Image: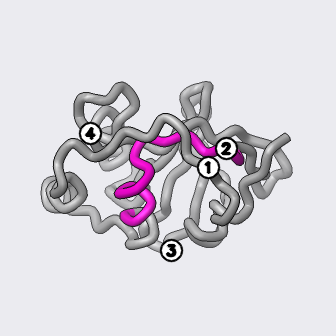
């Protein structure tokens, strides 16, 4: 996590945004993600490339925002993910082509969801490892 500078951060518009999200959607956000959102909501990481388990390099565009008024926010996609994955997959960051990095809430691992194929690919064992594996090309 060290060495990442977050750009274009959008401070949470309400201090209780995360608590309200958890109550409204019945999803518990892992603490490490909560801490990151509180300080870097909607931000773009300076280290923005990660390698998937299949060896493919993928760009991390931005964390999803927990402000409903922001363009790339969790509220625009959460209903789809709840329905498609029975509430077990939480999207947390975007990729430029419309794919998402997600937390598998059953294992806390990070997976990459490709919208064209609806395939999930393993990325990291947890969110800390995900952040530690980011690099710049």
Q: Is mark 3 on a helix, strand or loop?
A: loop
Question: In the rendered image, which quarter is residue 46 located in?
Answer: top right
Q: Which of marks 2 and 3 is nearer the N terminus?
A: 2
Q: Position of residue 124 (x, y in %)?
A: 66, 65
Badge 2 crowding class, 10 Å Cα cut-off, few under 14, some 14 to 19, many 20 or more, is some
Dot 2 and dot 1 residues touching (CB under 8 Å): yes
Give the residue number, with chain letter if any, for mark 2.
46
Separation of marks 3 and 1 at Cα, in angstroms: 27 Å
* Residue 107 disc label: 3
Residue at label 4? 67
Image depth: mark 2 or mark 4 in front: 2
Percent across and percent down for residue 132 are 69, 65
Are discs 2 and 3 less than 8 Å apart at CB? no
- For the residues marked 4 and 3, what is the alpha-carbon distance in whole angstroms? 26 Å
**Image-based side of 112 in relation to 63, left or right:** right
Mark 2 lies on a secondary structure that is loop
Q: What range is drawn magenta here?
A: 34-47
Q: Confirm whether the magenta stretch covers residue 40.
A: yes
Q: Which residue is drawn at 18% across and 62% down?
A: 19
Mark with earlier residue (2, 4): 2
Mark nearest the camera among 2 and 3 is 2
**Which residue carries the number 1 mark?**
5
Closer to the chain start, of discs 2 and 1, is 1
> What is the quadrant of the C terminus in the image?
top right
Q: Residues within 10 Å of mark 4 (few under 14, many from 20)?
A: many
Q: Foreground: 27 or 115?
A: 27
Q: Position of residue 135 (x, y in %)?
A: 78, 51
């Amino acid at each position: 996590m060290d060495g990442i500078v977050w750009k274009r951060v959008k401070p949470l518009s309400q201090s209780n945004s995360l608590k309200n999200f958890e109550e409204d959607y019945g999803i518990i956000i892992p603490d490490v993600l909560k801490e990151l959102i509180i300080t870097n909501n909607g931000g773009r990481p300076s280290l923005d490339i990660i390698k998937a388990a299949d060896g493919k390099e993928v760009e991390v565009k931005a964390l999803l925002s927990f402000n409903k008024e922001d363009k790339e926010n969790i509220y625009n996609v959460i209903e789809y993910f709840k329905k498609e994955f029975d509430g077990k997959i939480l999207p947390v960051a975007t990729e430029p082509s419309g794919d998402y990095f997600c937390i598998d809430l059953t294992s806390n691992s990070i997976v990459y969801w490709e919208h064209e194929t609806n395939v999930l690919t393993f990325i990291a064992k947890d969110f800390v490892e995900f952040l530690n594996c980011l690099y710049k090309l």
